[in-house]
Amino acid sequence: MVTDLNLLTVDLEEWFVVEALAGRHTYEDWERLPSTVEKNCLRLLELFRRHDVQATFFVLGYVAQQYPNLIETIHTAGHEVACHSFFHRRVDSLDREEFRLDTRRAMNAITKACGVRPLGYRAPSWSINDSTGWAFEVLSDLGFEYDSSIFPIKHDLYGMPKGPREMFRMKFDSGRFLYEVPASTYRVAWFNLPIAGGGYLRHCPYWYSSRIIRKLNRAGRPAVVYVHPWEIDPDPPAIEGLSKLQRLRTYGSTSILLAKLERLLTDFRFSTVMHYIQRRRQQQIGFR
């Protein structure tokens, strides 16, 4: 079944929490570092408004605590507000109870900011993997309806290479369900190629990304596009001492991402993750 609907998502976080900068700043440093999340988020909101499109914002609890009015603005504009943890700590660095406490704290901050409980979750740095499968049941117990943390690729920092590539539903002993919405990949031979988000969207030529999205749509699968506010910053904070790889991951092609998003929103249809899940529920197909 062909689809013409894709999923637009934003990981709402500060520039200083990114994986390439891990270990450079403690949580105590955060409040003295220059914040860019609000100004860049407002640029994204204006882009989405002009194209009359709704997105899912996976909100860091810390950002919700610091900028509650921004979260309310996102919600009022008709976007879905979901959860991206509180402190951006990798799930595979936490035990079960630490994960539960961090997630609940983030949920509370988000709910306080906009009055709506988040139904979706995305782990920092795609860090739910083969060693942290217990996290899915915790999310279900906390009342989440879906997760979007699996990235079925092989990568030095994250990934679940043998993970599912399509949306599916998990059922737990409690009787609860949790939908999984993996990051988009395209299968070539024995490899899953990442597309349509983060550095992959920034560095790859537009013709490549758009071509693969169309192939996914013809196969009946939505592309999951994801961006971060710091990726569209025209004047990002200077960061000293980065390796060439870290600089590429942090700064590479950020000057052209907004123009790429403009083209994507012109060429393709997008919705929130929850809207897509609800539509699939109504069709009562595609889940197992």
Image (cartoon, rainbow, N blue to C red):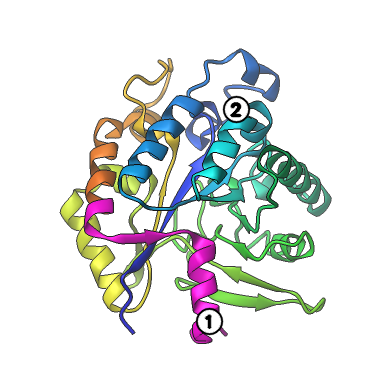
Name the residue nearer the viewer: 15 or 249: 15
Query: Residue 152 got which mark?
Result: none
Q: Residue at x 39, y 26 (%)?
A: 243
Is tag 2's residue or tag 1's residue first in the polypeptide sequence?
2
Image position of 33 with respect to 76: above or below: above
User: Would you say 102 lies left or right of 72 here?
Assistant: right
Farthest residue in the front direction? 76
Question: What are the residue bounds of the magenta stretch?
Answer: 265-288
Q: Nearer the viewer, mark 2 or mark 1?
A: 1
- Residue 211 location in percent, x, y? 20, 63
Q: CA distance from mark 2 to mark 1?
A: 45 Å
Tag 2, which secondary structure?
Answer: loop
Q: Which residue is mark 2?
A: 23
Q: Residue at x 25, y 71 (%)?
A: 215
Q: Which residue is mark 1?
A: 282
- Residue 263 location in percent, x, y? 22, 49
> Split into 4 quadrants, where in the image is the N terminus?
bottom left
